[in-house]
Amino acid sequence: MSGTLLDDHDVVLFDLDGTVYRGGELVPGALEAIQQAHRRGVAVRYVTNNASKPDQAVVDHLVGLGLEAERSEVSTSAQAGAAMLAEKLPAGSRVLVVGSAALESEVDRLGLVPVSGFADEPVAVVQGLSDELTYRAFAEACLAVRDGALWVACNADRTLPTERGLLPGNGALVELLRAATDQDPLVAGKPERPLLDRAVASAGGSRPLMIGDRLDTDIAGAVKAGMPSLMVLTGVNTPRHLLEARPEDRPGHVAADLRGLHAPKSEVAIGEQPAWSVTVGDRLDLSSRGEGDALGALRALCTAWWSTGSGPVQVEGTDDAARAALRTLDIG
């Protein structure tokens, strides 16, 4: 393989939380990597499962961090959730909004009528993250869903990466309503396809690449959409999570951060590594056979284990270099 990973793609979908930034801080390497993609003329789409902010607020946040961004480059799960409702409901239908003003605005923009209570006779419920939700909001939604209202969740992320650490995400709140109704929502955001498909279509792309930090949303969404993906180790999931990932959650590439987008494809692709050897038995034995880095060891381990099984596995290094790599990866 020659050239960089970016060379094969005409649009790059960047997850935001945990991939581009953590709260109010850019992830190291993100600024340079995205600027370089822009200079190459490759379409950029910022694809976020966070439904709490309008697209302009996302743009303002990105610009405030030093990035280039326009509203057309932002795709949110609030937009995808509202679009899903608009495809299924006639104009003027009443929708109970459990979420932020941004989500309410998206529902209104597509010709539906946002309401806040069961007494308003909603035919649907749409749920997105907001830090201002109250017990009453969930009680009203519970009544509506139990009465047969269509239920759409903007996303199902159980946690939200911030500069303070992991906080409850919309998925945790979806579980609350699921427990109270014994119903399951339709999901608009990752890992389902609507959000990603809309982002690619908006860019007119045919060779997309999805980049994210979460296996169960970013990477699983890419797998469902049939697009290549790059996992970065700057957010929720760890090398151990990657090694033990289910087949439907496995990326084709892994890098420390977004700078991997501009690395040679052979350096970021998950595959056999010249510097590392892995023996599969009751455990994985990692051995060095040249100068290699820890991420190369991770790619070699994933290649060996994924060809055999999935789930928990014991890993041991057979020499000093292998043991050092496993300590760096926190695998052992």
Image (cartoon, rainbow, N blue to C red):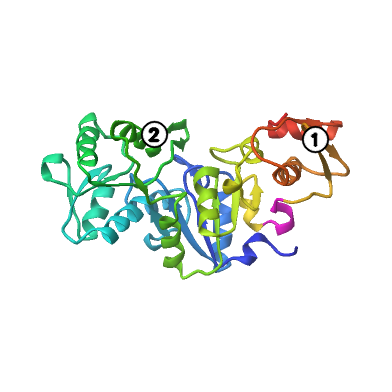
Name the side, left or right, on which 201 lies relative to 283. Answer: left
Label 2: few (<14), some (14–19) or many (≥20) C-alpha neighbours in 10 Å:
some
With respect to residue 125, does 209 lie above or below? below
Q: Earlier in the sequence, mark 2 or mark 1?
A: 2
Q: Residue furthest left?
A: 119
Looking at the rendered image, the disc whose residue lies closer to the viewer, 2 or 1, is 1
Dot 1 corresponds to which residue? 281
Name the side, left or right, on which 145 lies relative to 129. Answer: left
Q: Gap in Å between the C-alphas at discs 2 and 1? A: 38 Å
Q: Disc 2 on helix, strand or loop?
A: helix
The residue at the point 74 percent across, 51 percent down is 271
Q: Amino acid at mark 2?
A: Ala
From this viewpoint, is residue 201 visible? yes
Q: Magenta region: which residues?
A: 263-270
Q: Which mark is residue 247?
A: none
From this viewpoint, is residue 56 visible? no
Q: Residue furthest right?
A: 289
Return the x and y of residue 262 as percentages of the image width and height.
65, 58
Nearest to the observer: residue 286 or residue 205: 286
Residue 295 shown in magenta: no
The image quadrant of residue 287 is top right
Nearest to the observer: residue 68 or residue 45: 45
